[in-house]
Amino acid sequence: MTLNLKATNLGATASASDLIFEALREAIVEGELKDGDLLRQDQIATMFNVSRIPVREALARLEEQGLATNQRYKGAVVSSLSLDEIDEMFEFRALLEAEVIRRSVLNISAETLAEASRFAEAFAQETDSNQWARLNRLFHYTLYRDSNRPYHLQVISSALDKIARYLRAQLVLTSGIERARREHAGILDAAMARDSDRAAELTRQHILGAGRSLIGFLQVERAAK
Amino acid sequence: MTLNLKATNLGATASASDLIFEALREAIVEGELKDGDLLRQDQIATMFNVSRIPVREALARLEEQGLATNQRYKGAVVSSLSLDEIDEMFEFRALLEAEVIRRSVLNISAETLAEASRFAEAFAQETDSNQWARLNRLFHYTLYRDSNRPYHLQVISSALDKIARYLRAQLVLTSGIERARREHAGILDAAMARDSDRAAELTRQHILGAGRSLIGFLQVERAAK
DNA sequence: CATAAGCAGATTGGATCCAATCTGCAATAT
DNA sequence: ATATTGCAGATTGGATCCAATCTGCTTATG
């Protein structure tokens, strides 16, 4: 008799520390926790109804990811990025994402193209600004899927995590959305034509343009303080 | 009166967890801990004469860095990379390091060039194989120094950490050293001529070549098992 | 009145203890 | 004899407790 179950790896079930880490990570990425916010072990432990032990493990992992910084005996705070650092992140993403989409388009499937097309459409139609970041991410990541470069994707994701909360503010407050729609259409068109170099160059420009726009926005915002 | 001290940030002094993390990281990177080796909390705690609490924080951070993997209630083991994963790491490094050296050579200082030259020489003269990896890293990182891209460098460093122990074995057992000497000379030459594009392309080929060599080496080695 | 000293509460880092789970071996059943 | 069951020791995850350090306020001092 052969067992035919949809088995899940129970050895990899989430510990308290895992759940807390994921919750904090999401809160930072989504911007619910702001730059410089204090992350008090006791407060977080109470919220999750656990002791401070798993909280400290989660904070250690956040620090390793660059999303929080710890000062001994003082506590952890949400990391903040300088304009120079944000600028560098966009150059970094432009380099990596251009390469990844180039590889992906080289052997992209019809299904992947169809799915990316649906996300581009959903992004263009969406009126709820809270959904923009999610749909934007889905669109791009779908186009990267067939690159067969899991480590590249993981690093890209980690880089995006570090700047997502700044991008969110900018998308909502500037005309970034209309421009993103046009540029997505261009990238999708290149992908459908299997023109990997064009898709790469458009992606590169798309990211660098968003970066310039965000830097300009933040310069004004930060100068106001 | 103005104080003129070389002040260190005492708020950032190392905790037990920091020291243990660093020691384990180095042991994995240097290959003293092998792929699949079990990392027992109790054993490590005894070695450092501490409780298991800081050890667990160190292990959580190692996992976040991709150097160890944890199975709940079973323990942590040193991560191992498949050939495909190693292959991808070299493509990743080639892409990033070519870009970083290009930027660096664009405004490289005479001092930096002199220092890189000294490391190239030291690498070429060194007979102790244990020193090769260190001098190789110093040579390349010196050439990257003036790129003004700290995040890129950090990611490169993290990627190199994940494959350094495989590279070490290969450098010792093949004729990789003689070739590395020649290629280093070529890269240094391009940097001294301020030819950023040539330096970038040579670096790219240097890394991809080392990758092909290592993959070939590992294919034989792993097939033997 | 300004400044330094010191004390109390808050907070973090780590040790010890307990509960949940795993692993390998012995006992048992077929 | 082989396969299953059950138990003991080992190991991890988490809770509780203690020590080290920080912070802000109060008090002392010139």
Image: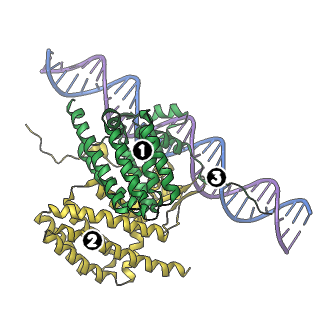
Chain colours: A green, B yellow, C blue, D purple
User: Disc 1 versus disc 2: distance between alpha carbons?
Assistant: 34 Å
Report the residue at 41% width, 34% height from top. A129
Type of amino acid at the residue the image marks with label 1: Asn
> Which chain does the numbered disc 1 sit on?
A
Q: Which residue is mark 3?
A: A10
Q: Mark 3 belongs to which subunit?
A: A
Q: Secondary structure at mark 1?
A: helix
- Residue on which the image places disc 2: B203
- The residue at the point 29 percent across, 82 percent down is B179
Which quadrant, please, contains the N terminus of chain A? bottom right
Instruction: Give me the residue at 19% from left, 62% from top.
Output: B104
Chain ID at mark 2: B
The span from disc 3 to disc 1 (Cα, nearest Å) is: 33 Å
Q: Left or right of B113: which side holds B97? A: right
Q: Amino acid at mark 2?
A: Thr
Task: Count neighbours of disc 3 (C-alpha within 10 A) and say few if under 14, some if 14 to 19, many if 20 or more.
Answer: few
Find the distance from the CA under tag 3 to the CA under tag 2: 44 Å
The answer to whether marks 3 and 1 sit on the same chain is yes
- Mark 1, other Cα within 10 Å: few <14 / some 14–19 / many ≥20: some
Q: Dividing the picture into quarters, in which one does residue A49 lie?
A: top right
